[in-house]
Amino acid sequence: MSGKISFFKSVENYVDKAASYTDIPRGLVEQIKACNLVLQIRFPVRVGNDYQVIEAYRVQHSHHRLPTKGGIRYAESVDQDEVMALAALMTYKCALVDVPFGGAKGGIRINPANYTVEQLQSITRRYTTELIKKNFIGPGIDVPAPDYGTGPREMAWILDTYQAFRHGEIDSIGCVTGKPVTQNGIRGRAEATGRGVYYGLRQCVSYAEDMAKIGLTPGMEGKTMVVQGLGNVGSNTALISQKEGGVKIIGVSEREGSIQDLNGIDVEKLLAFRRETGSIIGYPGSTHIGDALAALEMECDILVPAALENQITLENADRIKAKIIAEAANGPITADADPILQKKGIVILPDFYINAGGVTVSYFEWLKNLSHHRFGRLENRFQTNAFARIVSKVEEMTGKTITDRERELLTRGGTEIELVNSGLEDTMITAFDQIRETLKQHPDIKDLRTAAFVCSLKKIASDYISMGIFP
Ligand code: NAD
């Protein structure tokens, strides 16, 4: 929150602005904006010799498509306004990337670092029990996933609790996504959000005429990047951008402060250094440049805030020097800071587009769970044999032969991870191009965020209209 305006209200304001570029009836816009269900939970947990009352939420923002979908966050910032805003962003995100779900979000107001693994497990299981009691979870109702402060471990606890209550429910494994691969998860989910950020950025910088406007050449190779937050999203964005895109990571920020090395930081080594020492400060070759916000002000081509909301505010917006900001975190730029950045000509890739990789691959996981088999299992061998017959025929007709390695590459069917990544890549490319096309169709829209909201709103409105709810 900026202090003046709530996070949820700022999402509503963006939607109102986008709606003014459409002919969607006002009443329908109001329905789309409204949070459909809000569950507030309080339950006790034993900590040492005492009990603590835990504050938790689950918000289902939109039921225009079911199930609803969205992560569960464990953070001290969690309150009803934050969860409502994040649930709303999920609705627009799913619509934008054609994932057929309504938006939802959950949150528990704790700092996981203050609890033992056993306590975290009992909090997670109790929270899940509350969701089950209120009919707020299920493969066709509402499907949680990881978010800030949670990961595959918590998702496995949620699944186990759900199955204990819903023994025999055939699709129960689809009640939560982001599970460990060994617990009916899907390969590629853990890094999906960061990989999606990379694909979205790569598509954005591929247009020479757009890049010329901000003084950049097209392509990821050699671009400089600063990342805030080395958690799931931030570390995977940095790793993949470095390895696959040839991007130079020149600045990193974590809770303990910011470091820079203009020659480039090896992210894999930095992650190992932090695991060992508990901090990024002191990483060989780097300079400690200040607190967790300091790196945001570095001169760079791409800035990736990947920690929490409200990092770029009225206070520091004027000092941001990046050419492109990829909002890997949800809501890292406050509503009042956004126009300042735009005036500076900074291209902002909005959160509900650029971090949509997680929900996209969660959707693939859910499909895998409901189909009860691994992608590729049925068709892989058939495809390999079919391709092999084509290759043999071409060899026969040309009189030339290829090597065994070449034959293997040409004939094998896709593995699960290859299918997941290609589906994710296609989703991020298609959505970016739709947003860019919308900008072109509306020369009065100046920013990608408004254009992205226009795309989402039109899709959601068309769902409501096709249901016969609105004329
Ligand atoms: P995470 O808990 O894995 O990582 C967050 C990281 O940020 C941690 O390493 C933490 O120490 C660091 N951090 C906290 N405060 C900081 C500060 N002030 N400065 C610098 N670093 C700080 O969380 P995550 O899953 O990577 O989520 C990060 C953001 O991405 C959140 O806004 C979340 O909603 C969003 N997001 C996550 C997913 C997902 O699949 N996990 C999907 C979409 C969006």
Image (cartoon, rainbow, N blue to C red):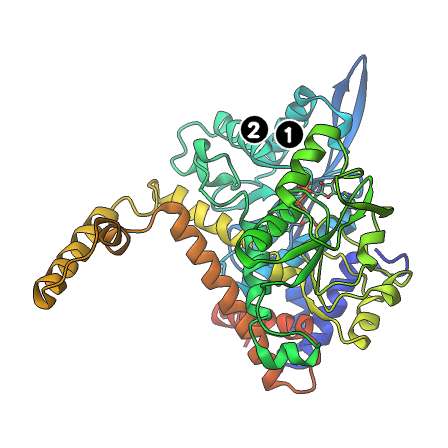
- Residue at horizontal 52 percent and vertical 40 percent from the top: 176
Query: On the image, numbered disc 2 is attached to which residue?
Result: 157
* Residue at horizontal 19 percent and vertical 57 percent from the top: 402
Determine the CA span between mark 1 and mark 2.
7 Å
Relative horizontal placement of residue 206, taking residue 275 as reference (left or right): left
Looking at the image, residue 293 sits to the left or right of residue 363; the answer is: right
- Residue at 64%, 60% in the rendered image: 352
Which image quarter: residue 133?
A: top right
Q: Is residue 117 above or below residue 320?
A: above
Picture coordinates of residue 441, whole percent (x, y): 59, 85
**Residue lying furthest top:** 49
Q: Which element is circle 1 on?
A: helix
Tag 1 residue? 124
Q: Relative to the observer, which residue lies in front, 235 or 76? A: 235
In this rendered view, identify the residue nearer to me: 47 or 214. Answer: 214
What x and y, as percent, mark residue 113? Answer: 75, 29
Q: Can residue 63 be seen from the camera position used here?
A: no
In which quadrant is the N terminus drawn? bottom right
